[in-house]
Amino acid sequence: MIIFQILLIVFLSPKCYGLLPSTLPAIQTRIISCASSASSSASLWSHAEEQQLQEFIDVSGGKRHCEIAETKFGRGLVATKDLKPNEEVLRIPLSCITMQTTDDDNNNDYWAGRLAAKLLATKQQNDDCPYISCLPEPPSIPSRDWPLTILEEFQNPDWLRDVCLAQEWRYNQWSNYQQTTNHPYDVSNDIVLEEDNFLFSSASLSFKDNEDDRPVFLDCLDLVCSRTIRTGRTLQLVPFLDMANHASREEGGGYYKKGNDDFIGLYAGERGISKGGEVTLDYGRRSNEDWLLHYGFLPNRNLVETVELGKNRIISWDDVGTANEALKQDCRILLDAFETTLQEDQLLLRDFHEKVPASEDFRYTLALQYRIARKILLSAVAGQKTASTASFTSAFGLVDAN
């Protein structure tokens, strides 16, 4: 345990930042978002600024049947009329969108840094831009500002290693931005660096790490990673649409698609939306580890949650009811190895909610919810009855399925 803590301290040094490039979603998925941060950042802008953004979309040729408003998840979008299933809710012209094409052929993941650089330039050149004025604070994600004491509460060393890699990725984005901005030409090797593609070896250049610039760039990077959508090889920051909070398709979440090469449309989910109801967007399906790492929250009832047992063995809800006794035994072994039981975690979460306001430290709440979700799945696959299998993880507290 001591050796593991030492390794974590090394990995979590001040130079490491990031998101895992290997877990970036594929086509037509929300990249990274944090609906749970909306309420905490709601005071950063005024209703006048929200109105300016809405007017900007309207005069730019956009179409909408929704408006900015407070929701149960904080700031979001609500319908201004009854909307049928799959009906267009919002249309944003491409002229309003900031875009960046990925470099699949070059096998690099520097799109985030390039898009962050574009956002930073916009902020510096036009700080009163309606979109810029309505941007929230960057989301709180593990690789940004979570202390080791909180990370250890998740009781998953493998995920902690992912956080370390994510921090390194985040720092590398900053490194590449600095080198390209300040050193467009490598004199020592007589190689012209292609500024648009970031084609260089990070070890081939030496540069001064400007500590004053780094926090600003990393803020832009985290905003990019929390608000970007993807269509094919193109990543986009889409004003107004990026205010939609998450809900799965099963919960009525909508979807987006590119139309006629001149706009991005947001569409109602299969349930439709009543006037005054919240307009939500399905951000995609992923493990709880990815939700935490990239979004900073946990979804309500993650039906695609998985738990790794080791030796490349991964269980999911599809394994519930299995006749494989070896698999069941592996689940029991992992359950016994945890520092706390499922029932103890459920009591801890209940007591924490009763004694401490949720706003005090949502990260500890997330840790308990994450542990509970893993242990419920493990118990279900192991064939064990639990005190409560109706509790699922949520960004806003326990949810009773009944």
Image (cartoon, grey):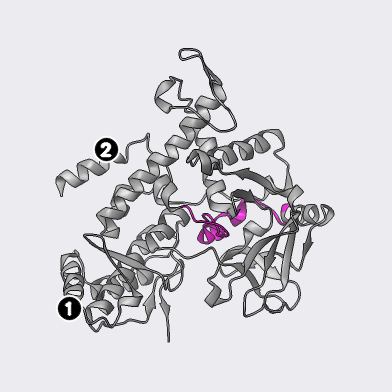
Q: Are marks 2 and 1 in contact (CB under 8 Å)?
A: no
Q: Secondary structure at mark 2?
A: helix
Q: Position of residue 125 (x, y in %)?
A: 70, 33
Q: Of the numbered discs in the image, which one, if any, rests on residue 294? A: none
Q: Residue furthest bottom?
A: 402
**Considering depth in this image, is 162 or 72 the residue closer to the camera?**
162
Q: How many marks are shown on the rendered structure?
A: 2
Separation of marks 2 and 1 at Cα, in angstroms:
40 Å
Q: Amino acid at mark 1?
A: Glu
Mark 1 highlights which residue?
Answer: 325
Give the percent coordinates (x, y) of residue 128: 73, 41
Q: Which residues are magenta?
A: 24-49
User: Going by the picture, which residue comes out furthest to the front?
Assistant: 105
State whether residue 17 appears in this view. no
Q: Which residue is mark 2?
A: 10
Image quadrant where one finds the C terminus: bottom left
Q: Quadrant of residue 392?
A: bottom left
